[in-house]
Amino acid sequence: MTIDRISEEQKRWQNLVNQGKPDQFTTVSGIPVQIIYTPADIPDFDYLRDLGFPGEYPYTRGIRHNMYRGRIWTMRQFSGFGTAQDTNARYKFLLAHGETGLSVAFDFPTLYGRDSDDSMSKGEVGKCGVAVSSLEDMETLFEGIPLGEVSTSMTINGPAAVLWAFYIVTAEKQGVPSEKLRGTIQNDILKEYIAQKSWLFPPEPSLRIITDIMAFGAKHVPKWNTISISGYHIREAGSTAAQELAFTLKDGMTYVEAGIKAGLDVDTFAPRLSFFFNSHLDFFEEIAKFRAARRIWAREMRNTYHAKKPESWLLRFHTQTAGCTLTAQQPENNIVRTAFQALAAVLGGTQSLHTNSMDETWALPTEKAVLIALRTQQLIAEEAGVVNCIDPLGGSYYVEALTNKLEEQAYEYFQKIDALGGMVKAIEQGYPQREIAEAAYRYQRAVDEGRRVVVGVNKYLLEGEKLEIPILKIDPRVEQEQCERLRRLRQRRDNARVHRALDDLKSACAGKDNVMYPILAAVRAYATLGEICGAMKEVFGTYAEPPMF
Amino acid sequence: MKKLRILIAKPGLDGHDRGAKVVARALRDAGFEVIYTGLHQTPEMIAEAAIQEDVDAVGLSILSGAHMTLFPEVMRLLKEKGAPDILVFGGGIIPKEDMEELYKIGCGRLFGPGTPTPEIIDYLKEKFPDRC
Amino acid sequence: MSALTIEELLARFHTGDRRACAQIISLVENDFPMAQELLTQLHPLMGRAYRIGITGPPGAGKSTLVEKLTQYLRRENFTVGVVAVDPTSPFSGGAVLGDRVRMSSLFTDPEVYIRSMATRGSLGGLARCTKEVCDVLDAFGKQYIIIETVGVGQMELDIAEAADSTVVVLVPESGDSIQALKAGLMEIGEIYCVNKSDREGADRMVLEIETVLELRPKNNTWVPPVIKTSALTGAGIVELYQQIITHRQHQEQSDVLSRRRYQALRQEIRRLIEEKITSNFWQNPGVNQELEQLLIQVASRRLSPYQAADRLINQFWKGG
């Protein structure tokens, strides 16, 4: 059976079935899907070149030799709300129920480097994450949790250096040296400009801080992932799978270039770069996306950036199921959506996974909802048998064709971005932001016109639906309590020491010294997040989004 | 006939603007004039812009949980500045209980995630029948 | 809207009530009958503001430049009105007016008034009544009024008429030469800004512009300066301000300004007459039906369009 013969037969069969009518099925991102795939759809397929073996270049099938047989992915539920104390309780709950990694969700003021008592923090303290304004808050957050034994991911970007410093000093006080610490800070400022929009400083100083963090990490916190290059938020903002893939990897390459430009040897920081992807609705498209990501990254790191260590070539990633696909209507359906999105991430070979809770279109998760989300992962790991072999869908004609297609589309985007002068310039010109806004609009049009079905929203509605699940409420006293704590802290501490530390920090920012050291000094003096970021803003300025609609 | 003018704003620190942008475009496609203020607006900024632009309604998009502070504050400021008749409506992540509380103080319709945009357009057309 | 009276609106307007100003602008923008009387009553207060037109192709960073310029004017203690015009969608008749996004820092300054307008089908870069809206802000007491518009369509006529100084903002884009730009932009500018001047090609663009300006017919001895600005960093803003002041002084000293405004008022009266006559004509009962009748004959080549027009005019034109 040659490829040509199969191709002939396939065309014959397709004509029979389609009867001359055009094929109208696409993935959720708009990639056309044929009615069937055969070897003729991957004519140049070369197993050893395109797939290889897990744990070996090009890592398409997985980055570890034994994948889940050796170690199940980390079950890491993103959480945080209210005060550090409230969140500490939730972490203990999750750990007791089998979570294997921690993930901190900060409130908006913290994400923006503002203290809980800042004027712009009014009404926002503790509402969508935990409020952490000082070292004291961080100590409370991890009270009773041995930082030498867990790995912690912190979703923080603009002020990442400061929160990381809080964590490092908290561990220090627990007697855990920084060399032992394991975890991740998101610290991906490029995607903030593109999608999540919680930036602090303009692009240049932000990149400088990132390279400082990478250098500090390589030296003092070698087990820590200093960036989690993220596509999750890009996808949540409405992008297609190809855009998520392309923009994320391009951001990654930009960081690699920045590190090299700052004089770092690529092999000293590349192994500590990690990624964060979305797991969206289209089951096979997502699996293909993860596989394409690994293959592209390996190739670029080895051939373009000349990394020599295999650890620099492999793309490690965390996945979160797609929040934007959850519905407020019939929220129990979200449990099912999350389940098949989680399954896609597992079949795609993720290293770490967060599953959304069903009530997140209404509020932050209740204990019951987050438990179901955690159990979803445990059920997949223990009962479904999918962990028994690696990349079980490898070799599927459809999946391989889709993997190739996504890779092709990613490279098209790389070329467009290069033509604009690179990712930073592309962001300044609003290119990725526009692509995303258009994709989001097209998606909504498709939903509004009924071309895309959302169960419970435009099909299978429930008349007179009453919400019957409990909803988490944040105690309004949280804000007051936080303000009180800060007031007392500012009274207790040595303010002269704080002042000196902040001055030193400003000098370092204006010069070329690594900012992590003066930040740590300020943190140890109990300077607050707002004070430290304020000092840095004085030197670096703040960012104004380029006008683009 | 006066053209329908709507201000769409993102108050507070929340940076998720996918919904706000999609709604702004949908309203434009329905023939309305939309003034989009962008992110990180304080209630003061929103109320002042609403007055200067003489809008018929202000749409707030809030996904950060801070809605119980921000909606009432915008409404209060509009009243203070002599424009209690400007309709305040919105959307985002708002529990049903909180929606009821906000309706009690005179807030317009709140649209949760998944609301088809034609529903928002119909609502505004209904509220302002004498606009085009 | 119907509950508002002219007296009540004007009373509030004269106390500096921004809502009253906004409501009057809306009446003007939507062509309500009250508008004419309001504008008449406010006419004595007009003519005090200096109007700056800012135009240029999309993406030139005009809004950010307007923000920076306004901030500077405020530092010099001037009060400012900004009218930002964006195109109406020809398909839906709606518009997203997003210029305010770049001007956030000005929202709560009580001496800055920002109004966004959509072109609403007018062919130029300005809305039909942009000038009248500026008039209202003028009467409201704003010392400087900045009109921001996208440089497309027949904007060269519009903006030159509406503004006392016209600033054209351009950006260095790799590969593009200014020959590719709309010819009008190179003819109407009185001050040229090369924005985003930290980009590559800025200096080259300055030279290109200066070369083209050399070839422009020179009138009233004003040589348009070419300035490099960077709205993001603020570079060149002071220079832009100074050039505007210089241009203003130049026009005032040589009487150009008053002649220009005189001409603009003449144009305005002519335009109003034409609009009224046309509007009155088409309000004649039966004129539309008669037009339809004549149209059948024109389509079947029994009458020419000229003959049809003459017949309608003879039948319905009452004159005056």
Image: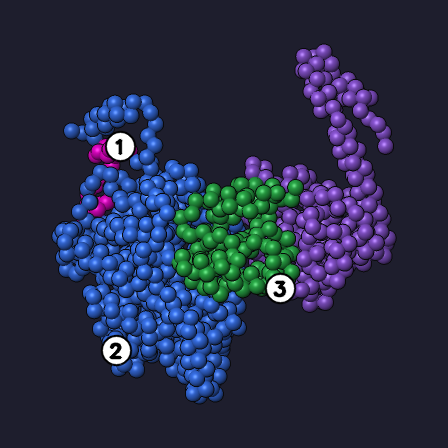
Chain colours: A blue, B green, C purple
Tell me what residue is drawn at x 42 percent, y 70 percent: A476
Dot 1 and dot 2 residues touching (CB under 8 Å): no
| Label 1 CA crowd tier, 10 Å (few <14, some 14–19, many 20+) | few
Q: Is residue A62 above or below residue C281?
A: below
Label 1, label 2: how far apart the Cα atoms are: 55 Å
Q: State left or right for residue C97 relative to residue A347.
A: right
Which quadrant of the structure image shows residue A165?
A: bottom left
Q: State left or right for residue C172 relative to residue A68.
A: right
Amino acid residing under circle 1: Ile
Tell me what residue is drawn at x 32 percent, y 71 percent: A87
Residue A454 in the image: state x and y as whole percent: 35, 43
Q: Is residue C162 above or below residue A498?
A: above
Boundaries of the magenta span: A34-53
Q: Can the viewer see residue C204?
A: no
Residue ID for mark 2: A144
| Label 3 CA crowd tier, 10 Å (few <14, some 14–19, many 20+) | few
Residue ID for mark 1: A35
Where disc 3 sits, the SS reads: helix
Dot 1 and dot 2 within a common chain: yes
Chain of the residue where label 1 is placed in the rendered structure = A
Closer to us: A497 or A43:
A497
Residue C230 in the image: state x and y as whole percent: 60, 59
Residue ID for mark 3: B80
Where disc 2 sits, the SS reads: loop
Tell me what residue is drawn at x 29 percent, y 49 percent: A333
Amino acid residing under circle 2: Gly
